C-alpha cells in the first residue's frame, strides 16, 4: 500500500482503530491463563518461523543500506538467530509475570460505611510508532496483551518486512489462545500519512507511544491529539568521581558507550572529576579510543593525542554512534550542573565509592533512571526484570522510566455500600 491520500490514511486507521476497540472488550475480560497462552504460543511461533523472519530482515537490511542508514542504525535493524531467540525469551518472560490487571492498588473504608478500592484496568487501545528496531514489534505486543490492551503498531519504513513477519507469528499465538486477531495490528504501509492519521485518532486510540529519534518523538508530541508517553532523546551521562574505583570505572565507561552505540541507553557524554584526572590521567579516554570511539572533548581533554576539540553542540547531543563528548568537571556539583543543563532526563550514572557523593547525585538529579557503579546500558525494561519494554518514558505523568506491562494500565474505583446514602 503506497502513496495514500490523507483521506485514505484516515480511513485505514479508522478501520484498524474500530477493530482494535472491539478487541479490547475481549482483552479486558481475558483470564491471566489465556493471555499467558497467547504469549507462549507467540514465542513458539517466532522460533518456528525464524527463517522467514531472517529472510524478511535481509530485505529490510538491503533497503536500509540503500537508504544510507548509519552502521549504528543498521545494527538496530539487523536480526539474527540470537536476536529472534531473545524476542521469544522476552515474550516468555512477560507471560510468566503476574497479571497487572485487576490488582487492588489501594483499599480503605470510610466512616460513612463505604468500602473503596482502586483497581488496575487496561488503558484500552495503544498506538506505537517506532523506528528501525523490529524487535519492538514483539516487545510492544507482548506488554500490551499482558495488560489487556489492543495495540496498533506502525514500524519504521526500513523495518516493514521484518515487522510484518514478526506480526504474523504474534497473531498465530493470539488465535491459538482464542483471543481476537485484531488485538495486535500492524499498519501495512510505509506512507507517512498513516502516522498523521494515527496521531489524530481520538476516540479510537487512548495513548500513543513513540519510540525513535528526536525528530520522530518531537513530531508526535507536536501533532498528537491523544495522550503521549515519550522520551525525546537518550542523552545519557557517566560521571567518574574522584572517589571512583579505577577498575570499576574502566569497565563501566567502555561498556556504557561501546557495547551498543545505537541504543537509547548508550552513554553520550563522559564527565571526569578533576580529582580523578589528577590521580589517573587519561586512562578512561584512552580506553574509549582503544574501543574505537571518537572523543570530542574540551579543555585539557582535548589535548590528549587522538581526541578532537568539541563544538558546543556536542554537549547535549544524542550521537547514537561511535562518538562521545567528554569534559572535566569540578566534583559532583559540576557534574550535576552540566547534566541539568544538557541532559534529557533519561539515564545518568555516577562512578564512586563515596556514599555521600552518590546520595547527592541521586537526590539532586531528576532523570528517570539514576545509577551508581553500573553501565547506562542497563536502562532497559528487560534488564529491570520487566521482560521487555515499549520505551523509556522521561516525562512525569503516569509512566516514567521503562514502560512495561504494569505501566500500561490505568485504574478505576470500585465503591461498595449497604444502602448507603449521603446526608
Image (cartoon, rainbow, N blue to C red):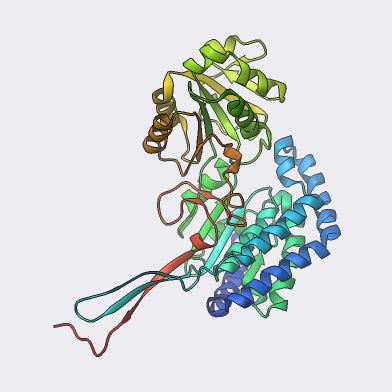
Of residues 140 and 331, which is closer to you in this image? 331
- Judged left or right of residue 47, residue 365 is left
Residue at 67% of width from left, 68% of height from top?
Answer: 39
What residue occupies the far left of the structure in this picture? 423
Q: Is residue 24 above or below residue 393?
A: below
Q: Quadrant of residue 213?
A: top right
Image coordinates of residue 308 in percent, x first then y, are: 62, 15
Q: Quadrant of residue 23?
A: bottom right
Of residues 82 and 75, which is closer to you in this image? 82
Image coordinates of residue 209 in percent, x first then y, are: 54, 55
Q: Quadrant of the C terminus?
A: bottom left
Q: Quadrant of the N terminus?
A: bottom right
Image coordinates of residue 310 in percent, x first then y, are: 56, 18
Q: Is residue 200 visible?
A: no
Q: Quadrant of residue 9?
A: bottom right
Q: Is residue 68 above or below residue 248?
A: below
Amino acid at each position: 500500500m503506497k502513496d495514500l491520500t490523507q483521506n485514505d490514511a484516515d480511513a485505514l486507521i479508522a478501520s484498524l482503530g474500530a477493530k482494535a476497540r472491539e478487541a479490547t472488550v475481549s482483552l479486558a475480560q481475558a483470564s491471566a491463563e489465556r493471555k499467558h497462552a497467547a504469549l507462549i504460543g507467540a514465542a513458539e511461533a517466532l522460533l518456528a518461523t525464524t527463517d522467514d523472519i531472517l529472510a524478511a530482515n535481509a530485505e529490510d537490511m538491503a533497503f536500509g543500506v540503500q537508504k544510507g542508514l548509519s552502521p549504528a542504525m543498521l545494527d538496530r535493524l539487523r536480526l539474527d538467530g540470537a536476536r529472534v531467540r531473545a524476542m521469544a525469551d522476552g515474550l516468555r518472560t512477560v507471560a510468566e509475570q503476574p497479571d497487572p490487571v485487576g490488582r487492588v492498588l489501594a483499599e480503605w473504608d470510610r466512616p460513612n460505611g463505604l468500602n473503596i478500592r482502586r483497581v488496575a484496568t487496561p488503558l484500552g487501545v495503544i498506538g506505537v510508532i517506532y523506528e528501525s528496531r523490529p524487535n519492538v514489534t514483539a516487545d510492544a505486543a507482548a506488554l500490551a496483551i499482558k495488560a489487556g490492551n489492543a495495540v496498533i503498531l506502525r514500524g519504521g519504513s526500513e523495518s516493514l518486512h521484518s515487522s510484518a513477519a514478526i506480526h504474523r507469528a504474534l497473531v498465530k499465538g493470539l488465535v491459538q489462545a482464542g483471543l481476537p486477531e485484531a488485538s495486535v495490528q500492524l499498519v501495512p504501509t510505509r506512507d507517512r500519512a498513516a502516522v498523521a492519521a494515527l496521531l489524530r485518532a481520538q476516540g479510537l486510540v487512548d495513548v500513543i507511544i513513540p519510540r525513535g529519534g528526536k525528530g520522530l518523538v518531537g513530531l508526535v508530541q507536536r501533532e498528537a491529539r491523544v495522550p503521549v508517553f515519550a522520551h525525546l532523546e537518550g542523552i545519557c551521562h557517566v560521571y567518574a568521581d574522584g572517589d571512583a574505583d579505577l577498575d570499576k570505572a574502566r569497565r563501566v565507561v567502555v561498556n556504557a558507550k561501546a557495547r551498543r552505540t545505537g541504543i537509547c541507553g548508550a552513554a553520550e557524554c563522559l564527565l571526569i572529576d578533576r580529582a580523578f584526572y589528577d590521580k589517573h590521567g587519561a586512562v578512561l579516554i584512552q580506553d574509549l579510543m582503544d574501543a574505537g570511539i571518537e572523543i570530542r572533548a574540551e579543555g585539557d581533554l582535548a589535548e590528549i593525542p587522538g581526541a578532537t576539540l568539541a563544538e558546543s553542540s556536542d554537549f547535549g547531543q544524542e550521537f547514537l554512534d561511535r562518538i562521545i563528548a567528554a569534559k572535566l568537571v569540578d566534583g559532583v556539583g559540576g557534574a550535576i550542573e552540566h547534566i541539568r543543563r544538557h541532559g534529557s532526563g533519561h539515564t545518568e550514572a555516577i562512578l564512586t565509592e563515596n556514599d555521600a557523593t552518590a546520595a547527592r547525585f541521586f537526590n539532586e538529579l531528576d532523570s528517570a533512571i539514576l545509577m551508581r557503579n553500573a553501565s547506562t546500558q542497563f536502562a532497559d525494561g528487560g534488564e529491570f526484570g520487566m521482560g521487555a519494554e515499549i520505551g523509556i518514558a522521561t516525562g512525569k505523568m503516569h509512566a516514567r522510566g521503562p514502560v512495561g506491562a504494569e505501566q500500561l494500565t490505568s485504574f478505576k474505583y470500585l465503591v461498595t455500600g449497604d444502602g448507603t446514602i449521603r446526608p
